[in-house]
Amino acid sequence: MTKAPRILVIEDEAQMRRFLRASLSNAGYQVLEAETAEQGLLQAAAQNPELVLLDLGLPDLDGLLVTERLRQWAKMPIIVISARGQEQDKIKALDAGADDYLTKPFGVGELLARLRVALRHAARTDAGDSQFSLGELEVDLARRQVRLRGEEVHLTPNEYRLLTTLIKHAGRVLTHRQLLREVWGPNATDQTPYLRVYMGQLRHKLEQDPGRPRYLLTEPGVGYRLRTDD
């Protein structure tokens, strides 16, 4: 029997913990709980959960610092859940190492979908799979080949690096700064217009309707996400 993934909930609000406990348990997950940042960091180290749900507004330490401390050693996905809904808050959390961001209040369906995406991405990363497929798009990372509806698509080196960076983090929101740093290097992190140009080129080559992209999605003011089948 496959062991149910363990989800560590770091949340100081009792009502929200009850909601998450019920929602996650009903969906078949094991739930670990912590009311403070200190408890959460200790639980993460001791239990090594498959995923962390992290509130930013903790009583003893800001969730951004918790994210940074976890990222010093932990690879598990971190999904931030917070009442802070401003774009800058999302950008700070993602740049600190979070994999995704949910603004309170949110529905059970959206929460579970984000969990599935994050866990699937973590499993694929661990497996080191060199084949990626999404609808009619197929990418052979070992051979550096991209096919759409069975036909090979020519990408420039920067377009290919942008696509493979999105694939590596499929389902996760990547900020403009993260993408620019990974694709063009640390000196290009302020060149957001440059990134928009290359994303537009990728969409024209890979999307059926570049003006209404199905897979290469914009997160307004934050960055981009490669949509998965969820």
Image (tube, rainbow, N blue to C red):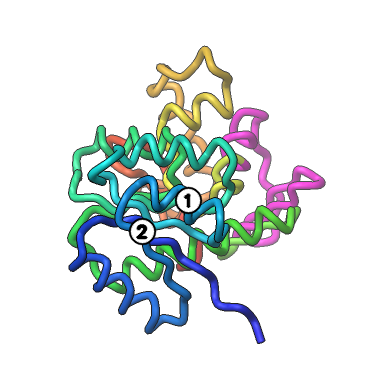
What range of the chain is rendered magenta?
137-164
Sooner in the amino-acid sequence: mark 2 or mark 1: 2
Residue that carries the numbered disc 1 in the rendered image? 42
Q: CA distance from mark 2 to mark 1?
A: 9 Å
Q: Which residue is under mark 2? A: 34
Q: Residue at x 57, y 46 (%)?
A: 74
Locate residue 129: give its quadrant. Answer: bottom right
How many numbered callouts? 2
The residue at the point 64 percent across, 61 percent down is 123
Disc 2 residue type? Ala
The quadrant of the image that shows the C terminus is: bottom left
Given residues 224 and 211, the one toward you in this image is 224
Which of the 4 quarters of the picture holds residue 91? top left
**Residue 66 drawn at (x, y percent):** 40, 40
x, y percent for residue 7:
46, 65
Please tell me whether residue 205 is drawn above or below residue 17 in the rendered image: above
Q: Position of residue 166 (x, y in %)?
A: 54, 44
